[in-house]
């Protein structure tokens, strides 16, 4: 699964491992398209990106209705 976002969205998470990966402060594995491989469940990771996008906007963040998805998203953020 390929998920894309703007670097501006990731920078909203300063300081974080995700931001450091995307700004090359940490060593990351890049493919031939200069995409970073992140070994996380895309079902949950998309909610993390939605949260980061909402930090600097007037958009209201909608949380998932499914408790298992919400739980998985929270656990993803703990690592």
Image: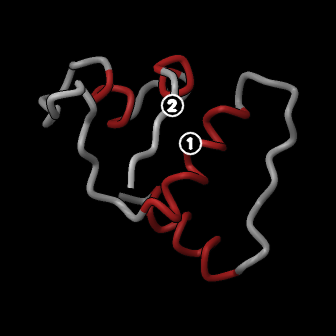
Q: In percent of the image, x 21 and y 19: which residue is there?
A: 25
Q: Residue 5's mark?
A: 2
Residue 28 drawn at (x, y percent)? 16, 34
Secondary structure at numbered mark 1: helix
Residue 66 drawn at (x, y percent)? 72, 79
Q: In percent of the image, x 79 and y 24: which residue is there?
A: 57
- Label 2: how many residues lie within 10 Å, few (<14), some (14-19) or many (20+)? few
- Label 1: how many residues lie within 10 Å, few (<14), some (14-19) or many (20+)? some
| 3D distance between C-alphas at marks 1 and 2 | 8 Å
- Say which quarter of the image contains residue 33: top left
Q: In percent of the image, x 39 and y 33: which residue is there?
A: 16
Q: Residue 23's mark?
A: none
Task: Tell me the mark number nearer the camera, choosing from 1 and 2.
Answer: 2
- Say which quarter of the image contains residue 68: bottom right
Q: In the image, is 71 to the left or to the right of 61?
A: left
Give the residue pinned by disc 1: 49
Residue 49 drawn at (x, y percent)? 56, 42
How is the protein colored in the picture?
Answer: secondary structure
Residue 9 drawn at (x, y percent)? 56, 25
Above or below for 23 versus 37: above
Q: Are marks 1 and 2 in contact (CB under 8 Å)?
A: yes
Q: In percent of the image, x 69 and y 81: which residue is there?
A: 67
Quadrant including the N terminus? bottom left
Q: In the image, is 51 to the left or to the right of 24?
A: right
């Amino acid at each position: 699964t390929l998920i894309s976002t703007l670097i501006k969205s990731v920078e909203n998470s300063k300081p974080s491992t995700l931001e450091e990966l995307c700004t090359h402060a940490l060593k990351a594995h890049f493919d031939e398209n200069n995409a970073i491989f992140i070994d996380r469940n895309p079902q949950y990771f998309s909610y993390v990106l939605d949260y980061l996008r909402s930090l600097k906007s007037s958009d209201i963040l909608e949380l998932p209705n499914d408790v298992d998805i919400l739980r998985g998203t929270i656990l993803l953020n703990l690592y």
